[in-house]
Image: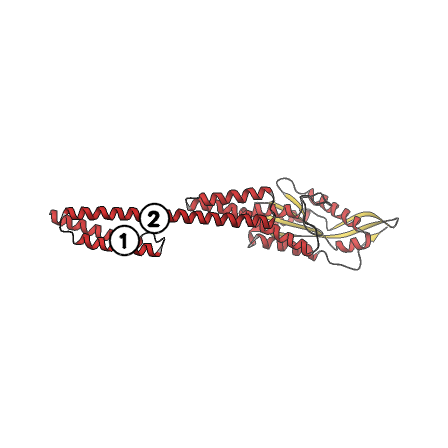
Amino acid sequence: MAGKQAAALNRVISVLMQGIALHGLQYDELAFRTFQDAVWKMRAGFDQAADEDSAMLLAGAVIRLLEEHNDAAQAHLRARHGEIGNMLGLISETLLDVTQANPQTVTQVRGMAQEIVRATSLNALGAVRGRLETCMAEIRAKAQLSAANARAGQVSTTATDGVTGLPDAGSAIEALARAWPKRTDQFLGLFALEYLETINQRFGFRSGDELLQLLGQQVGRHFTHPDQLFRWRGPCLVALVDRHAPESFVASEFARAVPPRLENATTVRDREAMVRVSTSWSMIRLDELGSLDEAIARMNEFSSTRSRYVRQVSAGA
């Protein structure tokens, strides 16, 4: 009976050693082959062990081999983790320098880079990933806006729009980036003056600015905290709202926010004129978009199509 138990034990140990040889930590090809060869030899010696003392000696040798292999593998993984951390730091610092990120973003990115390096589980990495995606989307969107402004010969936006007093396009992008991970039930309302360039050309920029201010006041009456209203580019304002309601209900709310036509008295060459201009609006549901970049592109498209010239703009004394 004892002989059968010893044989069974030998068989179990042999199978375990075979599994260890096949599935050890493959951190280095040459080192792993050396480890496999050593295990195969010890396994063969264990199968041929003549007595219990020989088997015990071989068992001790196997344990030492596993400990050495584990120590070497752990040292390799620590070194690899350190190198990944160094490269991650290099990438993040370069990104922050190139994008000229604000101090808050710099602090966020550096903090998340440290969290990634220290993470010891997939759950920890997953927790960082959501915040990292939001932060990277914000940086990417700001860079795209800056590039678009540079191509158009414009100065980068500041925190507040100088004409309407509303938060500017950069602030809108930051708000969108924060809302993006939880974008279900989030809507964008787009509101615009039609043919603003024509207004500016015929009646002067002051008249156009006054109409934009009037549009901001009219739309602003319909939205309260936590709704957010921003000046977008050109003749366009954008509202970001959270509504757990049917899409038709949200659309009717946006439609009520601005009258179909605005009018404003202005003075042109010592003569008072009443400038009347049409307005338009549109709605975007965030959870129907594939990316934050797509949302920005849709807002830019809406704004640009409202900036076209026409020959006549309604005016009356």
Residue neighbourhood size for the residue with mark 2, other residues' Cα within 10 Å, grouped as few (<14), some (14–19), many (≥20): some
Q: For mark 1, what is the residue?
A: 19
In terms of depth relative to the viewer, which is nearer, 21 or 216? 21
* Kind of residue sitting beneath label 1: Gly
Question: CA gap, disc 2 to disc 1?
Answer: 19 Å
Rendering quarter of residue 148: bottom right
Q: Is residue 37 above or below residue 258?
A: below
Instruction: Estimate the x, y position of residue 109 in percent, counting from the top left.
Output: 54, 45
* Kind of residue sitting beneath label 2: Ala
Report helix, strand or loop for mark 2.
helix
Q: For mark 2, what is the residue?
A: 72
Q: Is residue 211 left or right of residue 123?
A: right
Q: Residue extending furthest left?
A: 1
Disc with the residue nearer the chain's start (2 vs 1): 1
**Discs 2/1, front:** 2
Instruction: Estimate the x, y position of residue 279 in percent, counting from the top left.
Output: 72, 52
Report helix, strand or loop for mark 1.
helix
In terms of depth relative to the viewer, which is nearer, 109 or 296? 109
Q: Is residue 311 above or below residue 287?
A: below
Q: Is residue 118 above or below residue 305?
A: above
Rendering quarter of residue 197: bottom right
Q: Is residue 103 left or right of residue 316?
A: left
Mark yes or no: residue 247 visible. Answer: no
Q: How is the image coloured?
A: secondary structure
Q: Residue at x 45, y 49 (%)?
A: 83
Residue neighbourhood size for the residue with mark 1, other residues' Cα within 10 Å, grouped as few (<14), some (14–19), many (≥20): few
Instruction: Estimate the x, y position of residue 172 in percent, counting from the top left.
Output: 63, 47
User: Quick check: marks 2 and 1 in contact, CB under 8 Å?
Assistant: no
